Image: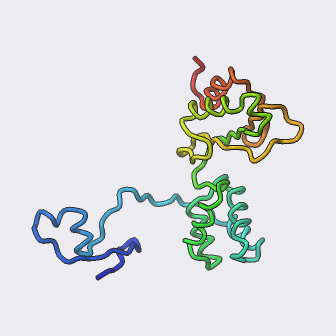
Amino acid sequence: MGGFDTKGRFHVHWGAAEQYAERREESALRRSGRPVPDPAYTHFAAMDTEPVDAIMAKYDYDRKQMLPILESIQEKYGYLPVGALKRLSQVSGAPYALIYGTATYYRHLHFEERSHTVAVCLCTSCLIAGANRIARTLAAEFGTEIGRRPAQGGVALERLPGHIPGAASPLVTLDGSRHPISQSGAAAWARTLTGRSVA
């Protein structure tokens, strides 16, 4: 037998607990059909959804335009807040799972607010100039890897899709603008970016 709890999650109920001691365990609570508090759940912060309504009006409330809508929301807020996605689902009529699935499929869309985005070009000319060593140094300093989602407010490290014409090698960008970084100065540059003291 199955049913939904107070958070809308589906659970299979196997009957009452066999011993009194088991009734206090989380699995026994689930089996009995009572709601179980979710320690990982935190309610999203309240936000102004007027920009979401304006973006939806711009795209004529068309759910087929989901990717440009999500990109516009991220451009407005700097990331994809849960409240904006809930409002998008409510206004467009698109299921939240469809919106979330679209947002998680594309790597350039993110749910966390980032302080900065550093991108390293790994084309042939940049690799010859030492971009691979710079990327490893930056990854070690930021505590992440290329393409991995950073922690809340952390620095995102990404790979540039292609070399910018006319740019010198190795090419490193900070929030879209080019920064000349050498192999020897990469660690110090990363420390100043994250606000740590340069040793």
* Figure quadrant of residue 179: top right
The residue nearer to you, when weighing 30 against 74, is 30
- In the rendered image, residue 186, in percent from the top left (x then y), is placed at 67, 26
Which residue is at the far top?
199
Relative to 52, does residue 139 appear above or below in the rendering? above
In which quadrant of the rendered image does the C terminus lie? Answer: top right
Asked if residue 134 is positioned above or below residue 94 in the image, the reply reads above
Query: Residue 127 appears at what percent x and percent y?
Result: 74, 33
Horizontal placement of 192 versus 168: left or right?
left
User: Which quadrant would the N terminus be assigned to in this image?
Assistant: bottom left
* Direction from residue 18 to residue 144 in the image, left or right: right
Is 162 located above or below residue 29 in the figure? above
Exactly how many numbered labels are in the figure? 0
**In which quadrant of the rendered view does residue 22 lie?**
bottom left
Which residue occupies 78% across, 39% down? 177
User: Which sits in the foreground, 116 or 146?
Assistant: 146
Residue 64 spot, x, y in % from top left: 71, 75
Q: Tell me, what colour scheme is on the image?
A: rainbow
**Observer-nearest of 11 and 152:** 11
Instruction: Kindly identify the residue that appears in the image at 73 percent across and 39 percent down.
Output: 122
Q: Residue 140's x, y, as percent? A: 56, 31
View extreme (bottom): residue: 1
The residue lying at 12 percent from left, 63 percent from top is 21
93 above or below 146? below
